[in-house]
Image (cartoon, helix red, strand yellow):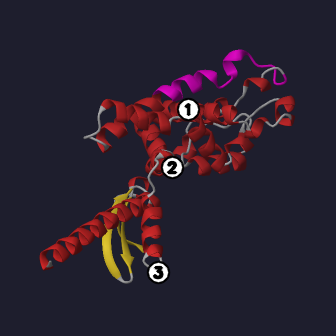
Amino acid sequence: MYLLRRLLRKKAAVFSEVRLRELEERLGYCFREPLLLEKALRHRSSLQSDKLTASSANEQLEFLGDAVLGLVTAEYLFRSYPREDEGKLTKYKSVIVSGLMLSKYAAKIGLGDFILMGSGEIRSGGRTRPTILEDAFEAAVGAIYLDGGLKAARRFIESRLLVFLEDELEAVSNQNFKSELLEYAQSCGLPQPFYSVVDSVGPDHHKTFIVQVSLEGRELGKGSGRSKKSAEQRAAQAALMELDKIEERKKTEILNDE
């Protein structure tokens, strides 16, 4: 299918074939209509020098991509967190579709290197400006949706963005279970907790990791998550709960002896 799409697609107007392939590899998607991708990456600052109209900029695709991103994220949260109330889901959604998150991922894959912009904007640092990166990412989502449909857009968003959801939620959380477990081990004169991946299930774009944490060779807890980091946090949480149970049993035994 991938090779067939390349054979059937039209020639890009601006990007060379080599440049286009590099960009598509970073996005993880092959366009049948490369002109959609070029439009997604055209900043308004390039219009005058290239003698183009306002409709050639990426703002319409950005508008569309924002809507698609919101829909896919809301659906993902609805299915992944069935017990959470509307307030929690809204909070989660605001984290994952925030400008900070989108611009951070766009910078991670080097999207700024491909944005078509005016020379003045380039000199002023436009290729690393968060708002420009955020807009380009949303426009790319819109382009993928028009080129491959909702299924392709969902696959892109889940594999390139939502996979980091749990890490981002934990980053804004006040509680760090791994740190608490480490502090407990240090206070008892024990070595650092040891984390190991014991299993992983699902396809690459939707994989779930299962991590086990041990202390002095004794298994204390397991946790699962969409990333190894989030699975480790949940394993540490389970370990702390187990340690609390152990402490409670010790207290009960002491009282009974008395």
The span picked out in magenta is 49-67
* Residue placed most toward the observer, 131 or 179: 179
Q: Secondary structure at mark 3?
A: loop
At a point 47% along the width and 26% down the height, the residue shown is: 67
Left or right of 59? Residue 145 is: left
89 over 113 or under it: above or below: above
Q: CA distance from mark 1 to mark 3?
A: 51 Å
Q: Which residue is mark 1?
A: 143
Tell which of 169 and 226 is nearer to you: 169
The residue wearing badge 3 is 191
Residue depicted at 42% across the width and 38% down the height? 92
Q: Position of residue 79 (x, y in %)?
A: 29, 41
Residue 108, above or below 125: below
Quadrant of the snapshot with the C terminus: bottom left
| Marks 2/1: CA–CA distance | 30 Å
Residue at 53%, 30% (x, y): give it.
142
The tag earlier along the polypeptide, 1 or 3, is: 1
Question: What residue is drawn where x is 87% and y is 35%?
Answer: 123
The quarter of the displayed image where residue 199 is located: bottom left
Kind of residue at disc 1:
Ala
